[in-house]
Image: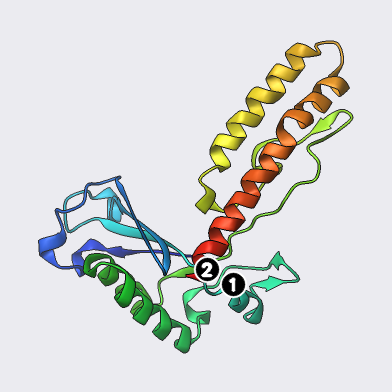
């Protein structure tokens, strides 16, 4: 799952306001997962230090079972995200302790505010391993064909590769769309499956730390 949210920069220490640049993203890895923070324009588009938002995405591999227990997942199907008011107090306390133990003081300050205010959202990360890309005159490409964890960093690139492959296949078989789509599947199915599997392995690795 991924915890997402944002806090007003003015709530953080003033000495830290100018440390990070607008529209830049900052990445950190630890046994608690991966944390990405980013500077965004604040209320009414304000961009001066102290008037911006600090957004965060915390990829958390340690609470997969909790998603089912809280009804976020039902038989592997996503029902909804986990909003602040629905997060158990015990989980908020755990997140607070984990953040303090694993992230920098500056990043922890962001998360502590969001946890205290219950202004964070727990969103399930969906992925599935595809078995088919085309059937006769119908084909799937991009996110419709393969949903993978953002941690793999391959989703956008795979979508571009799908596009190139299907265009090349159509050029190879300009008079037969069925043959072209079959060629596309031959070129892309195994590659796309391996990328999803690689992302799952990455998640399991961090989940075991």
Q: Is residue 82 left or right of residue 89?
A: right
Q: Position of residue 63 (x, y in %)?
A: 54, 75
- Say what secondary structure mark 1 lies in: helix
Task: Name above or below for residue 10 compared with residue 149.
Answer: below
Residue at left offset 27%, top offset 64%:
8
**Which disc number belongs to residue 131?**
none
Q: Any mark on residue 207, and which? A: 2
Is any atom of residue 180 visible in this view? Answer: yes
Q: Where is residue 186 in the image (x, y as percent from the top left)?
A: 78, 30
Residue at the image point whose x is 58% and y is 60% from the top = 125
Q: How crowded is mark 2: few (under 14 residues within 10 Å), some or many (20 or more)?
A: some
Residue 77, above or below 156: below
Element on which disc 2 rests? helix
Say whether residue 61 is visible: no
Q: Are marks 1 and 2 in contact (CB under 8 Å)?
A: yes
C-alpha gap between disc 1 and disc 2: 9 Å
Q: Give the image location of residue 47, x and y in percent.
A: 22, 48
Q: Position of residue 180 (x, y in %)?
A: 81, 21
Residue at 70% from the left image edge and 17% from the top image edge = 168
Which quarter of the figure has residue 181?
top right
Total marks in image: 2
- The structure residue drawn at horizontal position 71% and vertical position 24%, both measured from the top left corner, is 166
Image mark for residue 64: 1
Look at discs 1 and 2 and give the one toward the viewer.
2
């Amino acid at each position: 799952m991924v915890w997402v949210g944002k806090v007003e920069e003015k709530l953080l220490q003033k000495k830290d306001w100018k440390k990070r640049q607008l529209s830049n993203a900052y990445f950190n890895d630890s046994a608690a997962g991966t944390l990405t923070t980013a500077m965004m324009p604040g209320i009414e588009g304000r961009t001066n230090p102290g008037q911006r938002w600090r957004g965060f995405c915390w990829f958390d591999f340690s609470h997969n079972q909790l998603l089912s227990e809280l009804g976020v997942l039902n038989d592997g199907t996503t029902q909804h995200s986990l909003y602040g008011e629905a997060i158990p107090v015990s989980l908020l306390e755990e997140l607070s302790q984990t953040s303090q133990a694993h992230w920098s003081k500056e990043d922890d300050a962001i998360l502590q505010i969001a946890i205290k205010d219950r202004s964070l959202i727990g969103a399930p990360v969906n992925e599935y391993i595809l078995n088919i890309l085309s059937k006769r005159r119908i084909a799937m490409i991009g996110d419709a064909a393969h949903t993978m964890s953002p941690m793999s960093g391959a989703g956008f690139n795979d979508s571009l590769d799908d596009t190139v492959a299907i265009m090349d296949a159509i050029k190879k078989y300009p008079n037969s769309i069925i043959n072209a789509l079959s060629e596309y599947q031959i070129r892309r199915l195994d590659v796309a499956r391996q990328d999803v599997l690689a992302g799952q392995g990455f998640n399991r690795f961090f989940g075991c730390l």
